[in-house]
Image (cartoon, rainbow, N blue to C red):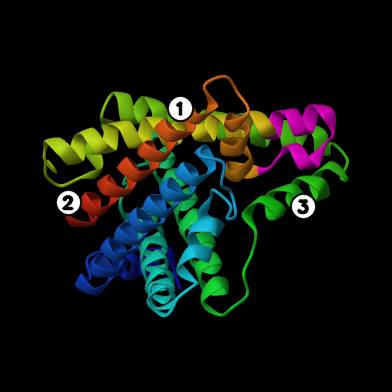
Amino acid sequence: MEYHDVKRVASRASDHPALEGLARVGYATSGLLHLLIGWITLQVAYGGGGKNADQSGALASLAGNGLGKVLLWVSVVGFLGLAVWQLADAVVGHPGDDKDAWGGRAKAVGKAVVYLALAYSAFRFATGKATNGRSQSVDFTAKLLEKPGGRTLVVIIGLGVVGVGLYHVYKGWKMKFLQDLKDHPGMWATRAGRFGYVAKGVALVIVGFLFVTAGINKQPQEASGLDGALKSLRDQPFGTALLILMAIGFAAFGVYSFSRAKHAKV
């Protein structure tokens, strides 16, 4: 299949109502997961912590009952829909050969990879093969550290995550996320998105610093992902208050994601 044929197929796929519907389901599913992460984070703030304060913990919460398992399968389909839509957007959504066009394509491909990973994680939980996000992060880091130049690579990954986190903070504070929507979602959804993006960005910055520390010290257990980042706050001055703010932030991002499911440009 030639490139022009790929573009034609991608264009048809991106405009198909079914794919649009699946993408919106994916955004709503993301909203549910962030609400659950917020709830788990709140439990951590008050001394709990039975589940991981990350996506694996949120998915584990859904896997615990019949309705949750149905929602897990809905999550698989929704995240796959978002991944396909992002891939189609990478092909046809950024015409031209300038820096902005290539940057948009790279961003779309990156998001597609993230959504595919989420779909795979949801699929594993739906089929009874639970995974642990914190353990996966530590194991991944340990394998990298065994490679030549592994420490440098782990530090680079950490700095990359810090950069993504700072971008989330910027996107939230400047309300750039409104550019992802076809119309204005309303005052409350905008406020939720602003606070949610900033809180999620701060969490990602902490995750990135943990990776950097793991690379510098050659200690893979320090790269403990979002769960480790949030639980590390518990031992800090005003740790409970900080975790409560993070919990509210994740919940706010969840609320915004539900609004995005309706107003997103897809």
Which picture quadrant has residue 154? top right
* Range covered by the magenta-colored residues: 211-224
Query: Badge 1: how crowded within 10 Å, few (<14), some, or many (20+)?
Result: some
Q: For this view, does 18 lie left or right of residue 105?
A: left
Q: Are marks 1 and 3 in contact (CB under 8 Å)?
A: no
Q: Earlier in the sequence, mark 3 or mark 2?
A: 3
Q: Residue at x 23, y 38 (%)?
A: 179
Amino acid type indicated by mark 2: His
Element under disc 2: helix
Quadrant for the C terminus in the image: bottom left
Q: Is residue 177 visible?
A: no
Query: Badge 3: how crowded within 10 Å, few (<14), some, or many (20+)?
Result: some
Q: Nearer the viewer, residue 63 or 168?
A: 63
Foreground mark, 1 or 3? Answer: 1
Label placed on residue 241: 1
Q: Residue at x 36, y 38 (%)?
A: 248
Q: What residue would you read off at disc 2? A: 263
Q: Nearer the viewer, residue 40 or 218?
A: 40
Q: What residue would you read off at disc 3? A: 139
Label 2 to label 1: alpha-carbon separation: 33 Å
Q: Main secondary structure of the magenta part?
A: helix
Foreground mark, 3 or 2? Answer: 3
Q: Earlier in the sequence, mark 2 or mark 1?
A: 1
Amino acid type indicated by mark 1: Ala
